Image: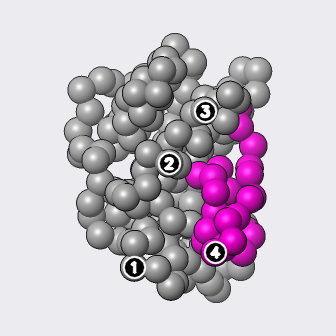
Amino acid sequence: MTIPKLFLLSILCVLITQSCTDESALTNENTSDTNDTATKSYAKVDQRLWPYFEAFEIAALERGYIYDLNDLGITGVIRRINDNGVAGTCQYGTHIHHVTIDSDYWEIASKLNREYVVFHELGHCALGRGHKEDANQSGYCLSLMNSGTTDCRVLYNNNNLDYYQDELFKWQE
């Protein structure tokens, strides 16, 4: 998801968090079903990420899948990412499953935007998914797993969470 530094905030918001032409696209409004607190703790995970990790597990369970991110050994931090325009990363492999969310992005993102990026990175770390760049005829990304480097526009909002979360978890069916 790398983009030139000069456009970090403006392009990042366009590519990752909102549509330029649709009022129903993801906005910076602070609305989301993700609460500020979690009922579950996660070892070696920044406490600010706990509600999003828990929401990921709940979204999976609602679709018939059980993912215990603690059992999977997924760790997570919020810190500055030095790669220009990168909101989050996942290092994953045989012995590591580690989510990093950029602290600059975290500070300006709404709850829904944060959820989008955390779910995307957990799609890599927990589900082993790669990027999927497909778009519909209107140019909207068809997957939460889009890289943010193509021309498709993200349309992740309270009206279509089910669609994107279904696609995230049911991709193997």
The quadrant of the image that shows the C terminus is top right
Specify the color scheme.
one colour
Q: Which mark is residue 138?
A: 4
State the separation of the CA atoms marked 2 and 4: 16 Å
Whichever of labels 2 and 1 marks the residue nearer the N terminus, that label is 1
Q: Is residue 35 visible?
A: yes
In the rendered image, residue 99, in percent from the top left (x then y), is placed at 57, 40
Q: Which mark is residue 170?
A: 3
Residue 100 located within the stretch drawn in magenta: no
Give the residue at mark 2. 163
Whichever of labels 4 and 1 marks the residue nearer the N terminus, that label is 1
State the separation of the CA atoms marked 3 and 1: 28 Å
CB atoms of marks 2 and 4 within 8 Å: no
Q: Residues within 10 Å of mark 1 (few under 14, many from 20)?
A: few
State the separation of the CA atoms marked 4 and 3: 23 Å
**Which residue is at a point 74% across and 50% down the rendered structure image?**
131
In the rendered image, residue 122, in percent from the top left (x then y), is placed at 57, 38
Give the residue at mark 1. 23
**Which residue is at a point 71% across and 37% down the rendered structure image?**
129
CB atoms of marks 4 and 1 within 8 Å: no
- In the displayed structure, 163 sits above or below 153; it is above
